[in-house]
């Protein structure tokens, strides 16, 4: 790891990878991951990725997104996402992503709150397919340095301008790293919850640093609970049962085997009905049945879910499975404009870390991968065209300073870093208070 790069990207999910792949190959890029490179929530996405099928689908796609978001969405952002979708899908295919096909043509599926089939997928591991192919392309680039088990501890900023970050490497050492631009693509906030479908290391680091450095946040209380995760008494990341299952015809039952909700309503509505039914029945979960699904071999359509349920003792081809809501997605985040630029100069954010207004108060199923990709690309193009990014002398005098000297320049509190466990716990508590205030 060097002291200076053109761009630092915090996170190696789809937003981080797509940003890197849209930057010129003469730019030196550092990408860091808090854990393994593959442990991003992008890898966990099951259902699929939305796309505008044709111009006749625009009004319907737009209305479905707005309705799911309770009309608190930002219209400009929704329009950008939808109109950019086909180009992004074509790029993914060019990068090697393999979407399921039927009779040689792309196959589309449907999920809750969608009025038509407009979701592309790869079995029930779409996120893994997209993210692994993008990460493979990133690894082929000689201008990109990838570092796993490397954590962003703080940012170096002054006069509302970001000059770089402080990282903790795998051996526990702290290093200042400078860059013309920094991209936050570091995922959601599942790690601050007891029950979540997210990886536990995703603890909203960018939000905590925003609070510390007065970077604008938006809708921090907009947290989505997924209606159906596999019920377990184990203290571990909850396994998500994709909304595509209900889109293909699965039913939800109460303890007596009665359906109690329209399974294709928006996620927040289904979640609320499940909680009401659990309270009414005095149970810890409700039941989900794949048995009503017709004309589809669920072991082929949902092979990953089938295998996982078998591991937990449930055969989806023969019996119902217990499901319960769990924290899943964060619609709020670091406030960004349509170019994914934050309120601080030379600092960008994309993916679940950011809030560009696409999702409103509730995310429409399978919009997350698309939104992340569209606005990551927008960020990369903005960095390239931003004349102020070409000012290489902005922090030149600081490059050879020690961390102690930099602490004075950037008003860093080094004493807080002495116990990083305490520091991270304090950050998580800051986020909890912000969500529930």
Image: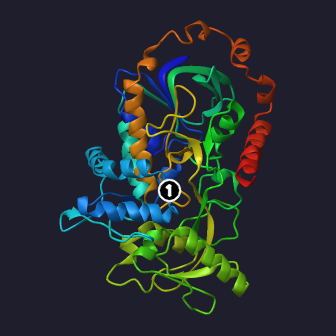
Q: Residues within 10 Å of mark 1 (few under 14, many from 20)?
A: many
Compared with residue 158, is residue 368 higher up or lower down, i.e. above or below? below
Residue 213 seen: yes
Compared to residue 145, the image places residue 401 above or below, namely above
Secondary element at image label 1: helix
Left or right: where does residue 49 sit relative to residue 276?
left
Residue designated by label 1 = 44
Q: Residue at x 77, y 36 (%)?
A: 423
Residue 365 visible to an observer of this rendering: no
x, y percent for residue 415: 81, 25
Residue at 46 percent across and 39 percent down: it is 16
> Which part of the image, by quadrant, shows the N terminus?
top right
Between residue 354 and residue 402, name the one nearer to us. Answer: 354
The percent position of residue 274, horizontal first and vertical second, equals 62, 78
Q: 415 or 370, which lies in front?
A: 370
In the image, residue 9 lies at what x, y percent?
Answer: 50, 32
């Amino acid at each position: 790891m060097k002291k200076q790069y053109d761009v630092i990207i915090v996170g190696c999910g789809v937003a981080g990878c797509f940003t890197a792949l849209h930057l010129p190959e003469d730019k030196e890029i550092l990408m860091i991951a808090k854990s393994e490179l593959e442990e991003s929530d992008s890898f966990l996405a099951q259902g699929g990725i939305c796309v505008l099928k044709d111009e006749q689908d625009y009004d319907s796609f737009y209305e479905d997104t707005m309705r799911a978001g309770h009309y608190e969405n930002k219209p400009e952002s929704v329009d950008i996402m939808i109109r950019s979708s086909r180009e992004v899908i074509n790029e993914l295919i060019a990068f090697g992503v393999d979407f399921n096909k039927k009779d040689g043509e792309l196959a589309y599926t449907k999920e809750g709150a969608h009025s038509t089939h407009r979701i592309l997928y790869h079995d029930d591991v779409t996120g893994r397919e997209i993210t692994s192919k993008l990460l493979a392309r990133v690894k082929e680039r000689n201008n990109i340095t990838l570092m796993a088990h490397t954590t962003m501890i703080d940012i170096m900023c002054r006069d509302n301008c970001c000059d770089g970050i402080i990282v903790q490497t795998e051996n526990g050492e702290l290093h200042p790293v400078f860059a013309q631009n920094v991209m936050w693509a570091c995922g959601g906030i599942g790690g601050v919850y007891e029950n979540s479908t997210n990886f536990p290391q995703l603890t909203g680091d960018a939000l905590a640093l925003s609070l510390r450095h007065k970077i604008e946040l938006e809708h921090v209380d907009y947290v989505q609970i997924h209606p159906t995760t596999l019920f377990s008494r184990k203290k571990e990341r909850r396994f998500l049962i994709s909304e595509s299952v209900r889109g293909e015809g699965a039913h939800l039952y109460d303890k007596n085997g009665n359906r109690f909700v329209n399974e294709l309503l928006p996620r927040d509505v289904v979640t609320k009905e499940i909680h009401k039914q659990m309270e009414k029945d005095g149970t810890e979960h409700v039941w989900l049945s794949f048995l009503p699904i017709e004309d589809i071999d669920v072991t082929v359509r949902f092979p990953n879910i089938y295998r996982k349920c078998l591991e937990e003792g449930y055969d989806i081809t023969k019996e119902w499975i217990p499901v319960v809501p769990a924290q899943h997605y964060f619609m709020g985040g670091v406030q960004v404009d349509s170019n994914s630029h934050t309120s601080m100069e030379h600092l960008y954010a994309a993916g679940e870390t950011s809030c560009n207004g696409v999702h409103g108060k509730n995310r429409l199923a399978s919009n997350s991968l698309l939104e992340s990709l569209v606005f990551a690309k927008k960020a990369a193009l903005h960095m390239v065209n931003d004349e102020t990014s070409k000012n290489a002398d902005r922090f030149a005098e600081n490059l050879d300073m020690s961390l102690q000297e930099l602490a004075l320049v950037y008003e860093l509190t080094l004493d807080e870093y002495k116990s990083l466990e305490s520091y991270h716990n304090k950050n998580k508590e800051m986020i909890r208070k912000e969500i529930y205030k």
